[in-house]
Image (tube, rainbow, N blue to C red):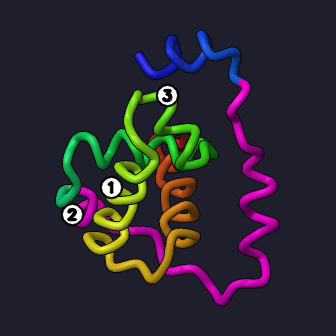
Amino acid sequence: MFEERWESLGGQMLRSMGTLWAETAMDASPAPPPALPALDKLSQRELEILELLGRGHAASDIATLLGVSPNTIQTHRLRIREKLGLDNAKQVAIQAALWISGIKDGR
């Protein structure tokens, strides 16, 4: 579903994960990956947004993709951050990327 919509947009909004990692390289050590029980606290919409963040999409791009306001995505990201006990949006993005890589690796 997401991939079809994403492809229909020509993939123009994809951010490089390398850029994300470069932006966070100077930060203090990120929080450890959330345990699966913490992910159980997230709603389906929050999991969708976490997945898109983990794939490197910016909040504004996700808003366009899902047809919602960027403020809505920011609110979801804040709730994700609170539910997972993270300190900032960068930690959310890092944890999302780690979660996605775990899914790909079958973890």
Disc 2 from disc 3: Cα separation? 28 Å
Q: Give the residue drawn at x 50%, y 41%.
A: 52
User: In the rendered structure, which amino acid carries the disc numbered 1?
Assistant: His
Does residue 47 appear to the left or right of 42 in the view shown? right
The residue carrying mark 1 is 76
Q: In the rendered structure, find residue 37 and report the number of the disc placed on it.
A: 2
Quadrant of the image containing the N terminus: top left
**Do we see residue 107 in this rendering?**
no
User: Residue 72, how many percent across, how many down?
Assistant: 35, 49
User: In this orientation, which residue lies closer to the viewer: 49 or 65?
Assistant: 65
Q: Give the residue drawn at x 48%, y 65%.
A: 92
Q: Which residues are magenta?
A: 12-39
**Do we see residue 13 in this rendering?**
yes
Disc 1 from disc 2: Cα separation? 19 Å
39 up-or-down from 83: above or below: above
Check disc 2: other Cα within 10 Å, few if <14, some if 14-19, many if 20+. Answer: few
Disc 3 from disc 1: Cα separation? 15 Å
Q: In the rendered structure, find residue 65 and report the number of the disc placed on it.
A: 3
User: In the rendered structure, which amino acid carries the disc numbered 2?
Assistant: Pro
User: In this orientation, which residue lies closer to the viewer: 1 or 29?
Assistant: 1
User: In the rendered structure, which amino acid carries the disc numbered 3?
Assistant: Leu
Instruction: Point out the tag, 1 or 2, that comes first from the N-terminus.
Output: 2
Instruction: Point out the tag, 2 or 3, that comes first from the N-terminus.
Output: 2
User: Residue 53, how many percent across, how many down?
Assistant: 52, 48
User: Residue 58, how many percent across, how many down?
Assistant: 60, 47
Q: Which picture quadrant has residue 78?
A: bottom left
Q: Give the residue drawn at x 78%, y 83%.
A: 26
Which structural element holds mark 2? helix
